Image (tube, helix red, strand yellow):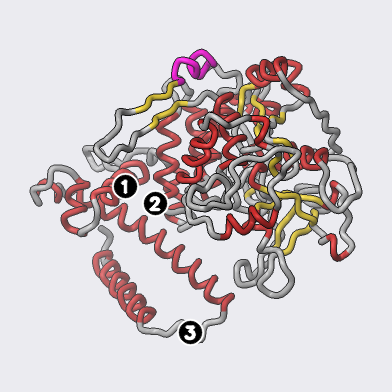
């Protein structure tokens, strides 16, 4: 330790305790809304940076054999004992220290770098949390052993870079994108492998007469399942506790909108319970697939989007309206059996061309939105297109036309956020000089985002988030298969400084 280092650490720790003591004794009532947001973000950054200090303390405790001297069987048990935290939290902190810290070998010579160097740097800056680190570690552990070291380093850099702008629940999407990018030809997972894994196992009834159904679905089965669940498992549908809840419909007898909305308003079931009741409706002897009716303006069906290039080479993946993916080869087989093909013509920015001028979006417009936007466009929302409605960017009541250029997708929850007044969200279409011409951007109210910066949603287009790819890692079809734009560095709709090259 440097001269005076021990005193400096003690002084810093005392100042930290005093600062926390001061904050806990202050009233937050006088603080305005915008300052509340800034204060929450500032304290969150400090909390994350303290996790780096905790990491280094764990390293020192292990270097000094404190867990063994304490009689603990492992570092995690030691942390659980001395900090009075849960076993899961202790394991998470220990594993983070393993992957993010600089450990010293015999002779006090440090390793060249942590296992996850970019994640370690982001945590040091307070840009990510230990939950982000946990997800990054999980994705990295899924990389097959045959992946080259350079590709593994690229994956870790991408995950750490995007973790700075995404929350931990959405970060796995980037992981899936990276896995698909590193293997665009499907060499690591063949369709035969997926077919071998398919299964549906029903357990014996338990003492309470309940049973457990464990299912491994192929991409084709998942796409069909999602399409039916989007209709029958939505709030208000197939509710056994509500006598007025509809169980089926057809084109001749559609469910009145006001009836479904009233049923949804009093529906207290969880998503899992709604899916159970939807499955029960499908298994009923009187069920007829023809009575599924329509869902958000389109017949209930599996809607898949793929590019002409992928169709021509029978490779890549098709995107479903429910947010899933199906290998193009499988999608083409389904098309050969029963399929209606809708060809969408896009402009140079990837947006659909002009289609119509009525108040309600017609089926062609909705298909165009599904193909281009794939889901709710509010930043951070993961609702797929099957859970979203067509929304006028400029409201129809304010003269906004029902042209494809003025339409976007918004789920019911996010659509309700768009309103006049200081607490309402706004939607705009980005101009030709923006990073994403023609895309829908959302402007949060000042109490959510004091800067009121227009932002787009990248969760349904994860390829846009990947930064520049080293030439040696570019497969033949990377840009086609993953939608990757390797020129610009973008995070949540704003240009950012790229991570330093190593």
Q: Which residues are magenta?
A: 189-198
Q: In the structure shown, which secondary structural element does the residue marked by tag 2 occupy? A: helix
Q: Position of residue 262 (x, y in %)?
A: 61, 59
Asked if residue 206 lies left or right of residue 407, the reply is left
Instruction: Looking at the picture, tell me which residue is in the foreground, 479 or 372.
Output: 372
**How far, Cα to Cα, is label 3 from label 1?**
35 Å
Q: Are marks 1 and 2 in contact (CB under 8 Å)?
A: yes
C-alpha span from label 2 to label 3: 30 Å
Specify the label residue 92 is tagged with: 1
The picture places residue 39, in percent across and down from the top left corner, at 50, 73
Disc tally is 3
Query: What is the spatial separation of the Cα atoms under label 1 and label 2, in whole angstroms?
Result: 8 Å
Viewer-side residue, 195 vs 360: 360
Q: Is residue 487 above or below residue 452?
A: above
The residue mark sitting in front, 3 or 1, is 3
Residue 438: percent from the left, percent from the top?
A: 81, 48
Dot 1 surroundings within 10 Å: few (below 14), some, or many (20 or more)? some
Point out the image quarter for the N terminus: bottom left
Task: Answer with the quarter of the image where residue 349 lies.
Answer: top right
Q: Is residue 400 magenta?
A: no
Under circle 1, the secondary element is: helix
Q: Is residue 418 above or below residue 347?
A: below
Provide the residue designation for mark 3: 29
Report the side of 131 relative to 296 (left or right): left
Which of the labelled discs sits on residue 248, or is there none? none
The residue depicted at 65 percent of the width and 33 percent of the height is 320
Determine the residue positioned at 60% across, 35% down: 228
Q: Which residue is the site of mark 2?
A: 130
Magenta part, dominant SS: helix
């Amino acid at each position: 330790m440097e001269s005076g280092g021990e005193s400096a650490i003690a002084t810093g720790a005392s100042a930290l305790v005093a600062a926390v003591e001061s904050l806990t004794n202050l009233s937050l009532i006088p603080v305005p809304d915008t300052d509340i947001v800034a204060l929450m973000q500032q304290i969150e950054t400090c909390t994350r940076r303290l996790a780096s200090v905790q990491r280094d303390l764990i390293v020192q405790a292990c270097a000094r054999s404190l867990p063994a001297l304490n009689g603990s069987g492992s570092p995690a048990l030691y942390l659980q004992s001395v900090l009075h935290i849960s076993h899961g939290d202790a394991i998470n902190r220990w594993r983070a220290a393993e992957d993010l810290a600089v450990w010293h070998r015999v002779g006090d010579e440090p390793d060249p770098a942590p296992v996850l160097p970019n994640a370690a740097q982001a945590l040091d800056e307070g840009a990510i949390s230990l939950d982000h680190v946990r997800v990054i570690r999980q994705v990295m552990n899924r990389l097959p052993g045959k992946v080259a070291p350079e590709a593994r380093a690229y994956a870790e850099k991408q995950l750490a870079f995007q973790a700075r702008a995404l929350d931990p629940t959405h970060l796995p999407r980037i992981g899936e994108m990276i896995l698909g990018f590193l293997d665009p030809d499907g060499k690591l997972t063949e369709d035969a492998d997926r077919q071998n894994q398919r299964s549906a196992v029903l357990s014996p009834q338990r003492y309470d007469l309940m049973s457990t159904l464990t299912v491994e679905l192929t991409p084709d089965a998942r796409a069909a399942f999602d399409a039916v669940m989007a209709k029958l498992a939505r709030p208000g549908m197939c509710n056994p506790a509500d006598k007025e809840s509809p169980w089926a419909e057809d084109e001749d007898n559609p469910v009145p909108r006001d009836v479904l909305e009233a049923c949804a308003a009093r529906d207290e079931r969880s998503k899992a319970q709604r899916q159970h009741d939807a499955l029960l409706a499908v298994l009923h002897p009187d069920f007829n697939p023809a009575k599924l009716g329509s869902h958000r303006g389109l017949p209930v069906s599996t809607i898949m989007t793929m590019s002409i290039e992928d169709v021509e080479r029978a490779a890549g993946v098709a995107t479903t309206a429910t947010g899933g993916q199906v290998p193009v080869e499988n999608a083409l087989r389904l098309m050969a059996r029963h399929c209606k093909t809708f060809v969408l013509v896009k402009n140079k920015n990837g947006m659909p061309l002009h289609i119509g001028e009525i108040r309600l979006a017609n089926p062609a417009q909705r298909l165009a939105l599904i193909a281009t936007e794939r889901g709710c466009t509010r930043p951070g929302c993961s609702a797929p297109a099957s859970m979203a409605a067509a929304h006028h960017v400029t409201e129809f009541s304010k003269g906004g036309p029902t042209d494809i250029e003025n339409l976007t997708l918004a789920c019911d929850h996010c659509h309700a956020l768009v309103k006049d007044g200081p607490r309402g969200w706004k939607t705009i279409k980005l101009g030709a000089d923006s990073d994403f011409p023609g895309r829908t951007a959302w402007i949060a109210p000042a109490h959510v985002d004091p800067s009121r910066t227009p932002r787009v949603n990248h969760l349904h287009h994860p390829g846009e988030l990947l930064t520049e790819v080293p030439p040696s890692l570019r497969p033949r079809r990377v840009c086609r298969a993953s939608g990757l734009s390797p020129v610009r560095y973008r995070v949540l709709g704003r240009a950012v400084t790229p991570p330093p090259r190593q």
